[in-house]
């Protein structure tokens, strides 16, 4: 029996093995235009991780969204065991839906070893307990609108709290820098399997990253003036973490041009330790073009 949002996320990431190196993931039958990209990336990483010995954590992934996935249709993940070296393991994953490749991912796993350390400091921000929940902000401004609640459905597995207040008017958007920050954590326990936490955070990393591109242009949660799609996604995992504990997702967009916007993110725990770095490019086309 599935009891909590975290349970639903773990169930979504729990793939069925149908042959050697071949897995099948379910895709919720949502009334959305396409399958959420974070779901496909998270499931693909689960497939890659299932073909390793589990002793080497993933340290990076690089991926491309090739076609929009169809909600409600299962996705098959085909894993190629590219390399099993002394220190590194490499896997390539192709996601197929109805005979067509929709996504590919390459993931690298590294045997932990000692080395020197440094990192840039985490920005000073309010604690999550001092910020309103996203759901409360949306209800206060939008009411129980079907569209708003539908878009929230993708995020129900995570509690989101934006560091900066949401802006709703052109006047409020004027002069805003292309930056955004949000506290997140899974709603409920994700258990103790490190691969589950890594894949859950991979799922969450696609939720808000392109916010940084949109912040100067339109309200994040109002009617959209742009059709938006993720083009690629890259992540570097620096330290172990739990995705069911609060983490800060600091995001910024160094450039937007040619209908594409680039965003980068840093994910920190509450102690200020940098856990994950993320990069993504998104496509932005005016609605109706």
Image (cartoon, rainbow, N blue to C red):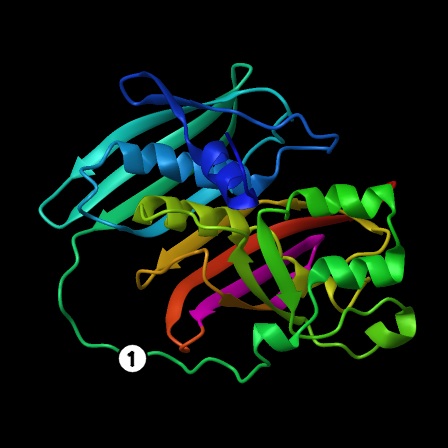
Q: Position of residue 143 (x, y in %)?
A: 88, 54
- Inspect this view and state whether residue 259 appears: yes
Q: Nearer the viewer, residue 283 or 98?
A: 98
- Inspect this view and state whether residue 286 appears: no
Start and end of the magenta stretch? 253-269
| Left or right: 50, with 233 as reference point | left
Q: Residue at x 59, y 20 (%)?
A: 73
Q: Residue at x 13, y 68 (%)?
A: 114
Q: Residue at x 40, y 77 (%)?
A: 271
Q: Position of residue 78 (x, y in %)?
A: 37, 24
Does the stretch in magenta take in 126? no
Q: Position of residue 172 (x, y in %)?
A: 86, 75
- Secondary structure state at the residue bearing disc 1: loop
- The residue labelled by disc 1 is 118
| Left or right: 234, with 173 as reference point | left
Note whether 116 is above or below 189 in the view shown.
below
| Left or right: 222, with 196 as reference point | right
Note whether 40 is above or below 220 in the view shown.
above
Q: Residue at x 40, y 81 (%)?
A: 120
Q: Quadrant of the C terminus?
A: top right
Q: Nearer the viewer, residue 212 or 38?
A: 38
Q: How many marks?
A: 1
Q: Position of residue 47 (x, y in %)?
A: 35, 32
């Amino acid at each position: 029996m599935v009891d909590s949002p975290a349970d639903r996320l773990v169930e979504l990431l729990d793939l069925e093995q149908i042959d050697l190196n071949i897995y099948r993931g379910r895709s919720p039958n949502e009334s959305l235009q396409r399958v959420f990209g974070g779901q496909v990336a998270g499931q693909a990483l689960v497939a890659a991780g299932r073909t390793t010995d589990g002793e080497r954590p993933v340290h990076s992934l690089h991926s491309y969204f090739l076609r929009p996935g169809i909600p409600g249709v299962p996705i098959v993940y085909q894993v190629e065991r590219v390399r099993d070296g002394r220190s590194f393991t490499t896997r390539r994953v192709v996601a197929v839906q109805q005979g067509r490749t929709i996504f590919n991912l390459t993931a690298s796993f590294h045997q932990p070893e000692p080395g020197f350390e440094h990192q840039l400091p985490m920005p000073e921000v309010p604690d999550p307990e001092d910020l309103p929940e996203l759901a409360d902000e949306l209800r206060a401004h939008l009411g129980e609108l079907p569209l708003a609640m539908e878009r929230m459905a993708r995020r129900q597995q995570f509690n989101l709290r934006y560091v900066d207040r949401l802006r709703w008017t052109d006047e409020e958007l004027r002069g805003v820098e292309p930056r955004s920050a949000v506290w997140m954590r899974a709603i409920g326990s994700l258990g103790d399997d490190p691969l589950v936490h890594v894949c859950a955070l991979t799922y969450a990393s696609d939720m808000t990253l392109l916010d940084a591109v949109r912040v100067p242009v339109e309200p994040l949660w109002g009617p959209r003036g742009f059709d938006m799609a993720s083009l690629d996604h890259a992540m570097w995992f620096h330290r172990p973490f739990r995705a069911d504990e609060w983490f800060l997702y600091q995001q910024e967009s160094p450039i937007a041009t040619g209908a594409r916007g680039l965003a980068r993110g840093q994910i920190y725990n509450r102690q200020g330790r940098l856990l994950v770095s993320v990069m993504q490019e998104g496509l932005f086309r005016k609605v109706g073009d």
